[in-house]
Amino acid sequence: MNIPFLNFSQMHTKIREKMVNAFEEVYDSNWYILGEKLKEFETNYAYFSNVKYAIGVSNGLDALHLSLEALSINEEAEVIVPSNTYIATALAVSFVGATPVLVEPDIKSYNIDPDKIEAAITSKTKVIIPVHLYGQPCQMDKIINIANKHKIAVIEDNAQAHAAKYKGKITGSWGDINATSFYPGKNLGALGDGGAVTTNSQELAKKVSILRNYGSEKKYYNQTIGFNKRLDELQANFLNVKLNYLDEWTCERKKIANIYNAELKGVGDLKVPYVIEGASHVYHVYVIRSKKRDELQKYLFKKGIGTLIHYPIPLHLQEAYSKLGFKAGDFPIAERLANTSLSLPLYPGLRPEEQEFIISSLKSFFNG
Ligand SMILES: *Cc1c(COP(=O)(O)O)cnc(C)c1O
């Protein structure tokens, strides 16, 4: 068998005709930037996310950056981010000149530990960016209570958790302003780069929509130093099609995850994902943990099973952040996760016999 870590082909074959049609609509419209298809997607995505406003932007990193810009975060600020996340969360903070302050995750859920946030807050702290890592929502009620108490803003990094819910409320609707990504491999993915900002604040929505378009609301009248960080008509219209399938695809992800959970629990020293109470986990990636991770990854590779490590090097040990002055041992939980985590194939269209082969391979690695 040859089972890649990610394969779009089942998903994309099914919607091929609709996607080709979406391409033709834009192609024939003669209008490719900031047009009707983007407006349609923004309306659809705001509705889906249960917020008043969605603003389509160029990618997830830019969605985070524009959210920080809209909140006027600058060099003087500190911004709390989890110590285990994709580097984009911290990079956006660095773009505005602010300092990322790392807070360790909870070892069970892998998400930022709300009980450790207050110790990291100083008079300079302006924002907390919880990341719904791997598709599991953070404990947003606790995080928002802390933020309110200290008059700090919250930006959800919702790049990995489209359609996830915590206590019945969808992610991307909790924070003051929230960022997501439509990178092809995300649960809702474009056919190229894309992202969005979601908010209930008319003022913040307006700021983002001006900043993404050269700081201009009216063509050739520039009111602020802006950027070119727009979502184009083609990607917006592809997303209009794919958004209709997101709930179905999310269900399929959960089904596959539940089979892994049931079959892999208790095998060797494997740890399967722990879902916190009140969370609806959407399994952007299915992460298991083992002390024999590297050996296991090699074994699966030999069997034709693709796996990835999310993420092999924690933020504080990345060369890009050497100037923060951290060393190995400073964030032991993030380091432990980096050394033991392994992501298995999980995507809509993964066939039952493929999943069975992955499971039996894992069992044979541990049980011989
Ligand atoms: C993918 C991702 C981003 C960045 O999104 P891009 O569209 O690739 O720029 C940000 N944060 C997290 C947690 C991500 O997984």
Image (spheres, rainbow, N blue to C red):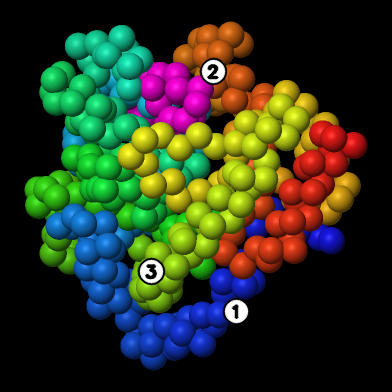
Q: Residue at x 33, y 39 (%)?
A: 278
Q: Residue at x 90, y 37 (%)?
A: 368
Q: What amino acid is labelled 2 in the image?
A: Ile
Give the residue at mark 2. Answer: 333
Q: What amino acid is labelled 3 in the image?
A: Leu
Q: Please say if the residues under marks 2 and 1 sit with CB atoms less than 8 Å apart.
A: no
Q: Is residue 291 above or below residue 131?
A: above
Give the residue at mark 1. Answer: 13
Label 3 CB less than 8 angstroms from ligand 1 = no
Give the residue at mark 3. Answer: 243
Residue 320 is situated, as x and y percent measured from the top left of the image, at: 54, 26
Residue 72 is situated, as x and y percent measured from the top left of the image, at: 19, 34
**Residue 99 in view (yes/no):** no
Q: Quadrant of residue 29?
A: bottom left
Q: Residue at x 18, y 63 (%)?
A: 220
Q: Is residue 348 above or below residue 78?
A: below
Q: Is residue 47 above or below residue 291?
A: below
Check residue 99 for magenta coloring.
yes
- Residue sitting farthest toward the bottom: 28
CA separation in Å, label 2 and label 1: 41 Å
Q: Residue at x 54, y 21 (%)?
A: 334
What is the crowding at mark 1: few (fewer than 14 residues within 10 Å), some, or many (at least 20)? Answer: few
